[in-house]
Image (tube, rainbow, N blue to C red):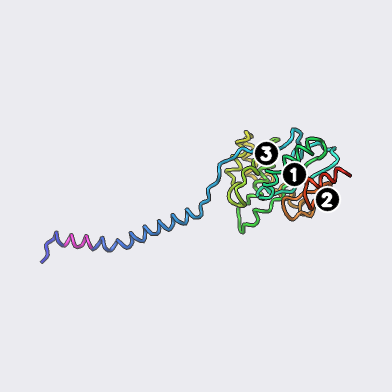
């Protein structure tokens, strides 16, 4: 007959063998979960302070002399890569050579649709970015905020315009954060954004960036079209 100590040792070994498969399964589950989290995690770039483009003469979403001979409207989505490229490479030239010289009255009209490409998306980055720009406009900083948005693009629907980052842009601009936060979180300007989308659609716009000159859609190079309009 086995002694008590020997039986205890055998039972202990048996128990360890019984629970070992569960431990292995648990470890594997944790590893798999970690891989899934890492594969879906998308780091968001730090906030970049952009180069500001606007002239000293601005009023809301417009800049320049309202009596200028040529009127330009830019239709853009803040998430649109082409719009970001125009902002980075061409907009400052248009402002310097045409707006600041009194030749062009320039209007920005948001057309926010890129966020709609994500199905069942509870947070539309295009819509919220435009709302945030309107909130900044309430504090006289539309164009500066506009530059923050384009200067901080990191790809379509990749989290560049999460609520946290939209608030960070406002803070970097030294806006009144209580006012801005309430404006953004309440969706105060959601209808303004939707109205702007309707305006773009009714204007025949189906892509961004698009421009009209005196109400006529530009089909080629903007600067060439501006020179032609001014030559009339």
Name the element at disc 2: strand
Give percent across and percent down for residue 205: 76, 54
The answer to whether residue 47 is left or right of residue 135 is left
Residue where numbered disc 2 is placed: 216
Q: Nearer the viewer, residue 177 or 96?
A: 96
How far apart, in angstroms, are the residues tagged by discs 1 and 3? 14 Å
Check residue 136 in the rendering and tell me which mark sits there, or answer none.
3
Give percent across and percent down for residue 101: 80, 35
Tell me if residue 11 is in the magenta stretch.
Answer: yes
Which stretch is magenta?
A: 7-13
Q: Earlier in the sequence, mark 1 or mark 2?
A: 1
Name the element at disc 1: strand
- Residue 54 occupies quadrant: top right
Name the element at disc 3: helix
Instruction: Identify which residue is drawn at 53% across, 48% down.
Output: 43
Circle 1 residues within 10 Å: few <14, some 14–19, many ≥20: some
Give percent across and percent down for residue 111: 72, 50
The answer to whether residue 117 is left or right of residue 35 is right
Q: Nearer the viewer, residue 137 or 83?
A: 83
Label pair 3/2, CB-CB below 8 angstroms: no
Circle 2 residues within 10 Å: few <14, some 14–19, many ≥20: few
- Residue 65 occupies quadrant: top right
Farthest-out residue, right: 232
Locate the C terminus by quadrant. Answer: top right
Instruction: Identify which residue is drawn at 57% across, 43% down.
Output: 164
Q: Main secondary structure of the magenta part?
A: helix
How far apart, in angstroms, are the residues tagged by discs 3 and 2? 29 Å
Residue where numbered disc 1 is placed: 108
Check residue 73 in the rendering and tell me which mark sits there, or answer none.
none
Give percent across and percent down for residue 79: 65, 49
How far apart, in angstroms, are the residues tagged by discs 1 and 2? 15 Å
Instruction: Identify which residue is drawn at 83% across, 49% down.
Output: 215
């Amino acid at each position: 007959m086995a002694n008590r100590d020997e039986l205890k040792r055998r039972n202990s070994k048996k128990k360890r063998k019984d629970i070992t498969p569960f431990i292995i399964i648990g470890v594997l589950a944790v590893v798999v979960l970690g891989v899934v989290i890492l594969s879906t995690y998308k780091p968001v770039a730090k906030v970049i302070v952009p180069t500001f483009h606007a002239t000293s003469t601005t009023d809301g979403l417009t800049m320049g002399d309202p009596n200028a001979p040529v009127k330009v409207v830019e239709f853009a989505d803040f998430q649109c890569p082409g719009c970001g490229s125009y902002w980075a490479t061409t907009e400052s030239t248009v402002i310097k050579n045409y707006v600041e010289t009194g030749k062009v009255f320039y209007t920005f009209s948001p057309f926010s649709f890129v966020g709609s490409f994500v199905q069942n998306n509870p947070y539309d980055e295009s819509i919220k970015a435009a709302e945030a720009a309107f909130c900044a406009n309430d504090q006289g900083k539309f164009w500066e905020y506009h530059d923050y948005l384009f200067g901080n693009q990191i790809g379509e629907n990749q989290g560049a315009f999460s609520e946290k980052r939209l608030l960070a842009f406002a803070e970097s601009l030294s806006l009144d954060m209580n006012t801005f936060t309430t404006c953004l979180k309440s969706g105060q300007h959601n209808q303004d954004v939707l109205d702007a989308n309707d305006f773009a659609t009714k204007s025949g716009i189906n892509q961004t960036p698009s421009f009209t000159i005196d109400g006529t859609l530009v089909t080629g190079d903007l600067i060439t079209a501006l020179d032609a309009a001014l030559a009339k």
